[in-house]
């Protein structure tokens, strides 16, 4: 029997708190899960710094990847005998679902920003490079790794396959919303996935939803909306991310200035020099990052020491609402005052916008750039969701952005009351001590 | 403060306004591929490289009043015109963000059609492939756009022109 068709003697199952069980029968999937590159995902948290706000949010990208695989597996069981569906694409879909986050590193968002990396590029490299994952995929067919990479990269010729993994209602989002809700402990993020899976249909080059399932999809959209504002954009999580980003900026700057570290940051050198090889990238997981942060909390450089200490011990920056248009002058004055009191404003006075986060939320097709969710009407016509659902329309039209100014309130409070800057800073921040 | 926002305002300020969200998306992507320091993350969408971050950042800029977004009705479709406001110009005077002069490039690109910029952006997206592979890939992922061999040739020529500027 060809490797691609090989089945395990007995089905393997993983207990899962969200889907109850993740079922594996294909030899290829089982072998992929066992590769070191996939096992590495156990050491990368799904939600980065969110555990500093929601203490339960310790789940990993490994959990999520298995979840996405399981959802796609269930969708394909439903698609099996439907028109428009090419059964030959089954294994490709399952592999792409399982491996879609393979290139994520620790605290991806901050690392990508500071070191100009792209986790999608690393996903591609792991799939196509000299890795255990590539060995498994190549056993299916020589061109199979490239096909998997193309699906994940959204450049595969069959758009229907792509839309299962990546669209406005895809397996990725359906898993992370439920999983993140479960582990953060919030009551949002729940929706009737079983119902959605039952009403999904392959339709030409996209996945559509039968009109009778509209209310389940509305629930899913509402869950997304609430999760973004209640969990993903939580200001305390953002504060931790601001500090994390500043640590990385600082340590890079020190390296460029020839600073002598107490312990050579060996694992980071290629990141500082922006020449990260696949091998370097795979070696850096959260355990390594935390180890360095512990070391940096004892460095001579006061800024690096302080920021690292803050991150490890959750001494986060406080925040105030901030409007960069109306409060430009105040910001400039604060910048000057921070310099005066010896707090470098480039590290300690940070404006952060929620859209800096790598999440998107529902907005129906703008100039056809993104494919909206389509409902399949009884007459086989397609209707865009927000045109049928008043609830979704209400959310889609609502633009909401959020800017906050982060600063170390504890450091300001510690200033002597006789220092005039202290009062002035608090006045400008619209706060009283 | 808000350096990435300021860079976008500078690009819009360097022309008489940019018409069309798709055009703006592709212009920033092309500038990024030419080595200009834009940090918006792009992934491949159904119609070529697309940045959700850029979409959100533009929303923020319009909400802040730094950029105006005018909804223009055409005969059978609509589009958005982006222009820098007085407040946006004021914002730039306070910003430390700098990008090399892009006026000529941006003006040139604003005169191209969105469809053509979409092609050029897509070709640049696959720039790690050989010329033949790029052309094959473009035809594969943009089947519905029906780009001709002449279009592709014009795309290659335009990429070279941009690189020479």
Image (cartoon, rainbow, N blue to C red):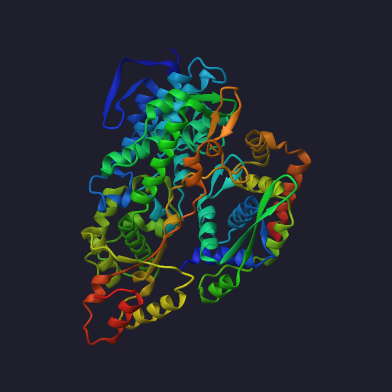
Give the tally of numbered discs. Answer: 0
- Image quarter of the N terminus of chain A: top left
Name which quarter of the figure residue A95 lies in.
top left
Residue A418, percent across and down? Answer: 23, 87
Taking the view exactly as shown, the residue that stands out farthest to the front is A390
The x and y percentages for residue A127 are: 45, 36
Q: Determine the residue positioned at 40% across, 23% down.
A: A74
Q: Is residue B77 left or right of residue A313?
A: right
The vertical placement of B28 against A128, above or below, is below
Q: Position of residue B144 (x, y in %)?
A: 68, 34
Q: Position of residue B91 (x, y in %)?
A: 53, 72
Q: Does A219 sit above or below residue A410?
A: above
If the image is split into quadrants, where does the C terminus of chain A sit? bottom left
Residue positioned most to the top:
A1
Whether residue B87 is visible to the viewer of this picture, yes or no, is yes
> In the picture provided, is A189 more to the left or to the right than A418?
right
Whether residue A318 sits left or right of residue A172 in the image: it is left
Image point (31%, 29%), residue name: A19
> In the image as oriented, which residue stretches furthest toward the right?
B150
Position of A74 with respect to A303 (left or right) is right
**Depth check: A77 or B97 in front?**
A77
């Amino acid at each position: 029997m060809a490797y691609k068709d090989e089945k395990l003697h007995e089905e393997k199952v993983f207990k899962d708190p969200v889907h109850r069980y993740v079922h594996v029968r294909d030899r290829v999937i089982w072998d992929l899960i066992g590769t070191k590159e996939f096992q590495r995902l156990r050491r990368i948290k799904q939600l980065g710094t969110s555990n500093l706000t929601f203490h339960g949010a310790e789940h990993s990208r490994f959990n999520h990847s298995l979840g996405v695989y399981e959802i796609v597996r269930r969708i394909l069981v439903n698609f099996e005998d439907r028109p428009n569906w090419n059964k030959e694409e089954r294994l490709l879909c399952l592999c792409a679902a399982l491996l879609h986050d393979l290139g994520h590193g620790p605290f991806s968002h901050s690392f990508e920003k500071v070191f100009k990396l792209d986790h999608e590029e690393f996903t591609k490299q792991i799939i196509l490079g000299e890795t255990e994952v590539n060995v498994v995929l190549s056993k299916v067919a020589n061109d199979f790794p490239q096909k998997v990479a193309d699906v994940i990269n959204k450049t595969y010729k069959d758009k229907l396959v792509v839309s299962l993994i990546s669209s406005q209602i895809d397996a990725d989002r359906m898993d992370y919303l439920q999983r993140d809700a479960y582990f953060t402990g919030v009551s949002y993020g729940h929706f009737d996935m079983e119902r959605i899976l039952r009403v999904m249909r392959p339709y030409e080059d996209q996945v559509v939803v039968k009109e009778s399932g509209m209310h389940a999809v509305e629930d899913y959209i509402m869950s997304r909306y609430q999760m973004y504002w209640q969990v993903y954009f939580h200001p305390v999580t953002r504060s931790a991310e601001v500090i994390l980003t500043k640590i990385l900026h600082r340590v890079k700057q020190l390296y460029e200035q020839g600073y002598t570290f107490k312990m050579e940051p060996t694992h980071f050198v290629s990141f500082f020099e922006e020449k990260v090889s696949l091998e370097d990238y795979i070696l850096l997981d959260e355990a390594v990052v935390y180890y360095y942060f512990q070391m940096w909390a004892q460095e001579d450089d006061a800024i690096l020491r302080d920021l690292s200490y803050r991150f490890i011990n959750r001494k986060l920056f406080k925040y105030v609402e901030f409007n960069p248009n109306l409060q430009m002058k105040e910001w400039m004055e604060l910048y000057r005052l921070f310099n005066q009191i010896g707090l470098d404003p480039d590290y300690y006075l940070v404006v952060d916008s929620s859209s800096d986060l790598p999440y998107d939320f529902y907005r129906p097709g703008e100039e056809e750039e993104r494919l909206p969710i389509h409902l399949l009407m009884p007459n086989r016509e397609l209707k865009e969701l927000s045109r049928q659902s008043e609830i979704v329309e209400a959310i889609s039209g609502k633009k909401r952005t959020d800017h906050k100014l982060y600063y170390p309130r504890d450091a300001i409070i510690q200033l002597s009351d006789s220092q005039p800057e202290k009062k002035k800073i608090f006045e400008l921040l619209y706060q009283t001590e | 403060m808000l350096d990435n926002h300021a860079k976008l305002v500078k690009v819009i300020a360097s022309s008489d306004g940019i018409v069309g969200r798709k055009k703006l998306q592709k212009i920033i992507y092309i500038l990024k591929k030419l080595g200009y320091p834009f940090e918006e993350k792009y992934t491949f969408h159904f119609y070529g490289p697309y940045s959700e971050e850029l979409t959100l950042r533009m929303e923020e800029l319009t909400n802040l009043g730094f950029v105006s977004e005018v909804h223009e009705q055409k005969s059978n479709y609509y589009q958005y015109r982006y222009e820098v406001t007085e407040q946006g110009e004021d914002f730039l005077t306070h910003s430390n963000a700098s990008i090399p002069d892009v006026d000529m490039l941006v003006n040139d690109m604003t005169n191209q059609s969105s469809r053509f910029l979409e092609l050029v952006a897509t070709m640049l997206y696959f720039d790690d492939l050989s010329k033949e592979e790029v052309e094959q890939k473009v035809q594969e992922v943009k089947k519905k756009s029906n780009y001709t061999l002449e279009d592709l040739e014009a795309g290659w020529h335009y990429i070279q022109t941009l690189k020479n500027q």
